[in-house]
Amino acid sequence: MAAQPAQQLPLLSNEEQAAVGILPASHWQQQSTQEDPNDDSASSLGSFVSSTASLTESIFAYRHINGRTYHGEIGNAESWEPNDERHKEALDIAHHVYTVVLDGKLHNAPLDKKNVQKVVDIGTGTGMWAIDFADEFPDSEVIGTDITPIQPPWVPPNVKFEIDDCNREWTWADNTFDFIHIRMMFGIIEDWDALFRQAYRTCKPGGYTESFVCDSTFRGDETVKDDSAIAQWGRVWNAAGKKMGRTFEVYAENLQQKGMEAAGFVDIEVKDYYIPLGVWHKDKVLAEKGLWWKIHAESDLEGYLNYPFHAVMGWTPAETGLYAAQLRKELNNPKIHGYTTVRSVWGRKPE
Ligand SMILES: C[S@@+](CC[C@H](N)C(=O)[O-])C[C@H]1O[C@@H](n2cnc3c(N)ncnc32)[C@H](O)[C@@H]1O
């Protein structure tokens, strides 16, 4: 498939945003008295779009948006995540969060240690899952793929990283892997059914595929007001995903289970995990999960918001910064009871 140039994304009008319940971006000005740390009006979607015209083939020729860097041109990938040092740290913390959420486990699929030889982690990020998995399964060979080279150089001998766009045709032969792991790839995958068809083809008979994703909408009880930053979060992300043609609503639409069923996987299991947003929960285990989740979110909130809110939805850096400041306040207020859910789905390819 030939490489496609990045598409210019038309911004959503105020009317279109209002239609899906998104408050005008100017709303956050009234909510916060904090100075905006991100006011860089020279950087905007316009400069991002024009910069894509002169991208080189090099995976190291990063895109710059509002002071953050993004992956270079590869295939038709259009990732919303920065690949700079600050965001790499956030991804490392995220790995710890997901491990704590899964009660210390790296997977739910019932893997037999003796029989797991070849494993792939699609969209591996900083590769922490691949490295931990390789340590736990020293006889396996683990490949981590990503579109950007943010993986560490020093890794266990049974790990290797490859640059690859998972939205394109996978080049591995049929029946290659004993285990395929796909974590937090919302807003990235163009077609979830096609993703699981490729996973099915490359999974060995008797092997497993497992997918893990977070609900893109924050929910809560009556303490979460409709005009709060927590309630607004999902509306903006979901509208941005629609604009990008890469949905964030994977949990809400149950795309993992549907995609695995359609591809032919069997013995599919679904497990949801509840995470309080912040430390408000009385249950100690849940409060710890919420604390780690909050540490992770706060480690690079601006990095998470920069692409969807600023580059896609057209909020100014100042508006995005004010929204982030308000969200931080709410996450640190134990009287506000927001939560999110993560869903793990795994299935077996029949023999
Ligand atoms: C939310 S991060 C998840 C990282 C890792 N799976 C984890 O859970 O820690 C998404 C990752 O997908 C990568 N990515 C984005 N588009 C991709 C594509 N088309 N093919 C492969 N990886 C991609 C990003 O560079 C980023 O590292």
Image (spheres, rainbow, N blue to C red):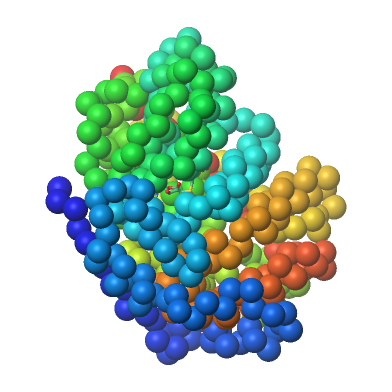
Q: Position of residue 211 (x, y in %)?
A: 46, 40
- Residue at horizontal 29%, vertical 65%? 52
Q: Is residue 86 above or below residue 319?
A: above
Please tell me which residue lies in front, 295 or 100. 295
Residue 247 at least partly seen: no
Residue 114 at least partly seen: yes
Outermost left residue: 2
Give the left or right position of residue 270, taking residue 54 as reference: right
Q: Position of residue 28 (x, y in %)?
A: 63, 83
Q: Is residue 116 above or below residue 102?
A: above
Q: Position of residue 48 (x, y in %)?
A: 36, 70
- Residue at horizontal 64%, vertical 40%? 96
Give the left or right position of residue 204, taking residue 135 as reference: left
Image quadrant occupied by the C terminus: top left
- Residue at horizontal 77%, vertical 46%? 288
Q: Is residue 176 above or below residue 282?
A: above
